[in-house]
Amino acid sequence: MRDGAAEPLDIVEARIWALLAPYRDELEEATIYGMPSLRWPGSGAHDYFAAVQRSARKVSLYAIAVDTWPEALDGASERFTGRRTGKATFSFPSLDDELAAELEAFLARLYVPYRAHHAGPGD
């Protein structure tokens, strides 16, 4: 956000996808309930790493793996965890640099067990 003005949602959505870009090398594009998602190749629709959906007032990141590996939230700020609006949903009406850095760190922590679960030992 700049000068207290709300950040346009297209910028919020683009920032979220940019934070997910490092995972595209190993993950495949898919959809879940019509939402674009990234998942481990060959895994089921409900076994996605992240899905993104834009609504009228926010952009939501769905990270269902956090239910399996809640330790990915360890060390996250109250401000970040306050964006968790559901079991696997994090809602962002805006995404400043500080919150984007926390989201980036959260995704990195979450990807470690997600990848280990799918890739298996030694991969």
Image: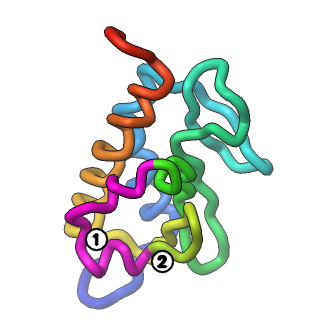
Q: Position of residue 42 (x, y in %)?
A: 66, 19
- Pick whichever, 14 or 36, lies toward us: 36
Q: Residues within 10 Å of mark 1 (few under 14, many from 20)?
A: few
Q: In the drawing, what numbered circle is on residue 30?
A: none
In the structure shown, which secondary structural element does the residue marked by tag 1 occupy? loop
* Figure check: 29 above or below 123: below
Scheme of colours in the image: rainbow
* Figure check: 95 above or below 111: below
Q: Position of residue 25 (x, y in %)?
A: 42, 21
Q: Three-letter amino acid code at disc 2?
A: Pro
* Figure check: 120 above or below 107: above
Q: Residue at image x 45%, y 47%?
A: 17
Q: Residue at image x 28%, y 80%?
A: 78
Tell which residue pokes out farthest to the bottom in this image. Answer: 4
- Distance CA(mark 2)–CA(mark 1): 10 Å
In the rendered image, the quadrant that contains the C terminus is: top left
Q: Residue at image x 43%, y 16%?
A: 120
In the rendered image, the quadrant that contains the N terminus is: bottom left
Q: Residue at image x 23%, y 58%?
A: 101
Q: Three-letter amino acid code at disc 1?
A: Asp
- The residue indicated by pointer 1 is 96
Identify the image quadrant of residue 4. bottom left
Magenta span of residues: 69-83
Q: Are marks 2 and 1 in contact (CB under 8 Å)?
A: no
- Pick whichever, 88 or 59, lies toward us: 88
- The residue indicated by pointer 2 is 93
Q: Residues within 10 Å of mark 2 (few under 14, many from 20)?
A: some
Tell which residue pokes out farthest to the right in this image. Answer: 33
Residue 76 part of the magenta segment:
yes
Identify the image quadrant of residue 112. top left
Residue 71 part of the magenta segment:
yes
